[in-house]
Image (cartoon, rainbow, N blue to C red):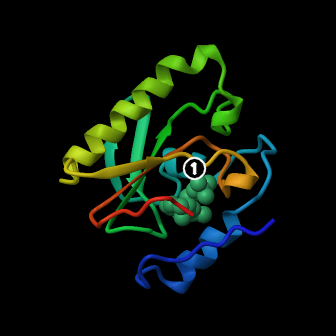
Amino acid sequence: LQCRRLPFSASASNDEQAAAKAAAVNADSGAPTIFDKIINKEIPSSIVYEDEKVLAFRDISPQAPVHVLVIPKFRDGLTELGKAEARHGEILGELLYAAKIVAEKEGILDGFRVVINSGPTACQSVYHLHLHVLGGRQMNWPPG
Ligand code: TR5
């Protein structure tokens, strides 16, 4: 299994890239993830938006000028979108709406992309459901 990750900019430090790699796993074990530590503020993140259910923070290895992750504060079994059940419908809607709020705050409502990688074949690396909000440059299609 090969997930090719090309940094959009060289701005991420070697330490940041090493941290991102260290956290990467390629299967859903259900174990706590690095995002729990971000939610609990045990490790710092650059928070863009927060409410009682949702947290949005900048990706450590940005693939576009704006690259924000939107996550549920309570994972509740949502390690990946492919594990969603009917009871998750409300939080899934809230995450999508939070993505729009992030796009508005970041000034990219003219065009932005929301991506969810679900499972190893889609290159998911952190098993706590998250939406990538990407923008600030011309996006291309199809995605890789
Ligand atoms: O590959 P998927 O779709 O699972 O996305 C996971 C994302 O989490 C990647 O884009 C990583 O760059 C990002 N990531 C990983 C870590 C991290 C992070 N974003 C912000 N802060 C992070 N810390 C502190 N540690 C990470 N390991």
Residue 63 coordinates in the image, percent (x, y): 44, 68
Residue 20 or 122: which is nearer the viewer?
Answer: 122
Q: Can residue 51 be seen in this view?
A: no
Q: Residue furthest front?
A: 142
Q: Mark 1 points at which residue?
A: 35
Residue 40 coordinates in the image, percent (x, y): 51, 45
For the C terminus, the quadrant is bottom right
Question: Which image quadrant for residue 53?
Answer: top left
Q: Is residue 128 left or right of residue 111?
A: right
Residue at left offset 72%, top offset 47%: 119
Count numbered badges in the picture. 1
Tell which quarter ligand 1 is in. Answer: bottom right
Q: How crowded is mark 1: few (under 14 residues within 10 Å), some or many (20 or more)?
A: many
Question: Can you say whether 64 is above or below 54 in the image?
Answer: below
Residue at left offset 57%, top offset 77%: 17
Question: Can you say whether 13 is above or below 90 in the image?
Answer: below
Residue at left offset 80%, top offset 51%: 27
Question: Which image quadrant for residue 51?
Answer: top left
Q: In this view, does 64 lie to the left or right of 80?
A: left
For the N terminus, the quadrant is bottom right
Q: Residue furthest top?
A: 87
Residue 125 coordinates in the image, percent (x, y): 67, 57
Residue 75 coordinates in the image, percent (x, y): 61, 33
Question: Can you say whether 36 is above or below 84 in the image?
Answer: below
Question: Which image quadrant for residue 135?
Answer: bottom left
Could you say whether the residue bearing mark 1 is in a helix, strand or loop?
helix
The response on whether ligand 1 sits within 8 Å of label 1 is yes
Residue at left offset 48%, top offset 83%: 13
Residue 137 or 37: which is nearer the viewer?
Answer: 137
Q: Is residue 107 left or right of residue 87?
A: left
Q: Is residue 134 visible?
A: yes
Q: What residue type is labelled 1?
A: Phe
